[in-house]
Image (spheres, grey):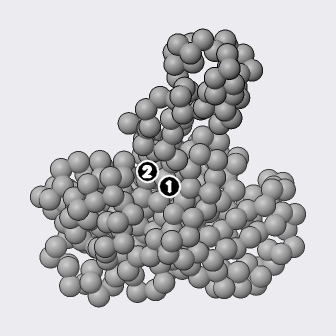
């Protein structure tokens, strides 16, 4: 099942010539999401040839403009393109975003906009996976998001055949979770399922200091996308501004035992030398990458 990530914006508060402000596109099966929507995100979507179809849910980590100001242009574009489906926003400060939408007159569009407040521990369920909200540590109320697939056991045809069950409607009933009787014997779905497969997990922190909650949620994640705004020489400023250094992001990844770490929200001062951040993270965690805008990859099944 497709699980794809495209980095639309990896810069810090100020964009550079090569990096846009924060935005991450995620596709899982037929669902398409944005996590944050900084300035110019819709143009990045166009440049990446992703399109706007099935983009129905936008998750904002916090209400700093480099993480949400791009939603206004996006909403206008969707309206001009004749959108009819509702559009859902999730944010820890729903009152602020809802008020801004009212000021812009977005209650008069041809499609409805829903703004939903989220807090630590909330779960938004979709078919086959959920998005878990977790509290992070920034200078304003902020959250991260984890997309976590359901664990699953696939139907094992060989087990059904060994029980003498013929192909057809009985297979369909077992696949749907229904027990059946065959030759006078009760056959439960568990009897024809393979080994349990752990669901894939993607975790995005937004802006944050290193915190235990991130480690807890990111445990054994396939991909952790973590704030790495500064190098260790700027650690005092990272603490004061509610951000992480690259080395601290690496330490979080190591503690959480993630498979891969991607550093994001890079300060413009590292535009010409991002390897400084990369090398600091690698001191504590080997499988780390700094991606460029519009780069993407699929998260493969374990």
Image position of 169 (left or right of 23): right
Q: In which quarter of the image is the N terminus?
A: top right
Report if residue 178 is visible in the image. Answer: yes
Q: Quadrant of the C terminus?
A: top left
The residue positioned 50% from the left and 55% from the top of the image is: 147
Could you say where residue 116 lies in the image, as x and y percent from the top left? 67, 74
Instruction: Measure the alpha-carbon separation of dots 1 and 2.
Output: 6 Å
Q: What element carries label 2?
A: strand
Could you say where residue 15 lies in the image, as x and y percent from the top left? 42, 67
Count of numbered tags: 2
Q: Which of 47 and 291 is in front in this view?
A: 291
The residue positioned 52% from the left and 23% from the top of the image is: 156
Q: Mark 1 points at which residue?
A: 147
Tell me the quarter of the picture where residue 94 sits.
bottom right
Q: Do the residues labelled 1 and 2 touch (CB within 8 Å)?
A: yes
| Crowdedness near tag 1: few (<14), some (14–19) or many (≥20) residues, C-alpha within 10 Å | many
Image position of 102 (left or right of 288): right
157 shown above or below 99: above
Q: Name the residue under label 2.
A: 201
Report if residue 279 is visible in the image. Answer: no
The outermost residue toward the front is 184
187 shown above or below 27: above
Could you say where residue 127 lies in the image, as x and y percent from the top left? 64, 47
């Amino acid at each position: 099942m497709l699980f794809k990530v495209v980095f639309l914006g990896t810069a810090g508060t100020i964009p550079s010539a090569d990096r846009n402000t924060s935005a991450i596109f995620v596709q899982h099966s037929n669902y398409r999401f944005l996590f944050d929507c900084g300035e110019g995100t819709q143009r990045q979507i166009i440049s990446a040839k992703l399109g706007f179809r099935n983009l129905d849910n936008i998750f904002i980590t916090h209400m700093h403009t480099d993480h949400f100001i791009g939603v206004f242009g996006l909403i206008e574009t969707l309206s001009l393109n004749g959108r009819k489906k509702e559009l859902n926003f999730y944010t820890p400060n729903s009152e602020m975003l809802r008020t801004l939408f009212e000021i812009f007159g977005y209650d008069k569009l041809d499609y409805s906009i829903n703004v939903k407040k989220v807090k630590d521990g909330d779960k938004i369920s979709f078919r086959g996976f959920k998005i878990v909200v977790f509290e992070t540590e920034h200078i304003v109320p902020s959250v991260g998001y984890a997309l976590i697939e359901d664990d699953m056991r696939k139907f094992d045809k060989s087990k059904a055949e060994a029980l003498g069950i013929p192909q057809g409607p009985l297979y369909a009933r077992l696949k749907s979770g229904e027990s059946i009787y065959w030759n006078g014997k009760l056959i439960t779905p568990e009897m024809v399922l393979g080994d349990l497969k752990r669901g894939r997990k993607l975790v995005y922190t937004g802006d944050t200091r290193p915190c235990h909650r991130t480690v807890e949620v990111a445990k054994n994640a396939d991909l952790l996308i973590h704030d790495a705004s500064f190098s260790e020489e700027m650690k005092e400023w990272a603490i004061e501004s509610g951000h992480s250094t690259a080395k601290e992001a690496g330490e979080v990844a190591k503690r959480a035992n993630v498979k891969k770490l991607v550093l994001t929200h890079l300060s413009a001062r590292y535009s010409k030398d991002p390897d400084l951040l990369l090398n600091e993270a690698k001191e504590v965690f080997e499988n780390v990458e700094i991606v460029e805008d519009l780069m993407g990859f699929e998260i493969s099944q374990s």
